């Protein structure tokens, strides 16, 4: 199965960096842990672009084998930037593997791979800033309270 090319692909990476968010300007970023089934639906709807170093090939192969995500394994690292069109980033979190200065090593033994566990975190960028959303929500609540008060008022006869 190959995922579609929609122009709104979901980016997938093993790490998160500030440069990934440089194309979005002011906005709100939400973060949530997601399931593999959710990812499959997301990738089927929007497509996927994988950003991984060539030495992370074995990690991607393991993830594809374990979770059947069928992620394309890139030959070269693709630099990604979130934007108005590409608002979704999934970071694959790897636990149980040794690291050097916080980074994954270029290679691991088969025994080390057996110890690895993976989880998936989705970041979603909204073009509206959180403060603006809070202010809009407060205004809507005030308007609703006024409407309810007007409709439930008691009339004197």
Image (cartoon, helix red, strand yellow):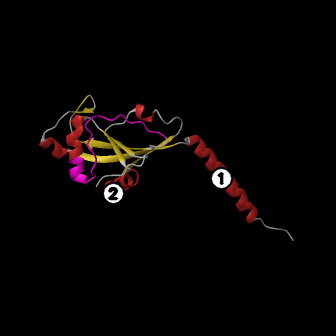
Residue 135 visible in the snapshot: yes
Q: In which quarter of the image is the C terminus?
A: bottom right
In terms of depth relative to the viewer, which is nearer, 78 or 33?
Answer: 78
At 23% from the left edge and 35% from the top edge, which residue is drawn?
Answer: 54
For marks 1 and 2, give the one nearer the viewer. 2
Report x, y in % for residue 156.
85, 68
Quarter holding residue 154: bottom right
Residue reaching furthest to the top = 101
Residue reaching furthest to the right = 157
At 41% from the left edge and 31% from the top edge, which residue is drawn?
Answer: 19
Report x, y in % for residue 139.
67, 49
The residue carrying pointer 1 sits among few (fewer than 14), some (14 to 19) or many (20 or more) residues within 10 Å by Cα, namely few
At 25% from the left edge and 37% from the top edge, which residue is drawn?
Answer: 75
Report x, y in % for residue 143.
70, 54
Q: Name the residue under label 2.
A: 37
Left or right position of 17 against 73? right
Left or right position of 118 against 115? right
The answer to whether residue 138 is above or below residue 151 is: above
Q: Does the magenta stretch include residue 68?
A: yes
* Mark 2 residue element: helix
Residue 96 visible in the snapshot: no
Q: Name the residue under label 1.
A: 140
Q: What stretch is highlighted in magenta?
A: 62-83
Magenta stretch: dominant secondary structure: loop
Report x, y in % for residue 130.
55, 42
């Amino acid at each position: 199965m190959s995922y579609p090319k929609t122009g709104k692909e979901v980016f997938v990476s093993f790490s998160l960096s500030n440069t990934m968010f440089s194309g979005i300007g002011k906005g709100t970023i939400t973060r949530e842990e997601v399931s593999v089934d959710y990812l499959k639906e997301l990738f089927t709807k929007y497509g996927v672009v994988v950003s991984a170093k060539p030495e992370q090939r074995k990690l991607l192969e393991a993830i594809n084998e374990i979770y059947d995500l069928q992620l394309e394994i890139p030959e070269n690292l693709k630099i990604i930037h979130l934007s108005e069109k590409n608002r979704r980033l999934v970071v694959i979190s790897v636990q149980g593997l040794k690291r050097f200065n916080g980074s994954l090593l270029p290679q691991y033994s088969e025994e080390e791979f057996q110890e690895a566990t993976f989880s998936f975190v989705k970041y979603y960028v909204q073009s509206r800033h959180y403060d603006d959303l809070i202010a809009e929500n407060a205004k809507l609540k005030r308007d609703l309270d006024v409407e309810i008060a007007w409709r439930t008022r008691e009339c004197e006869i």
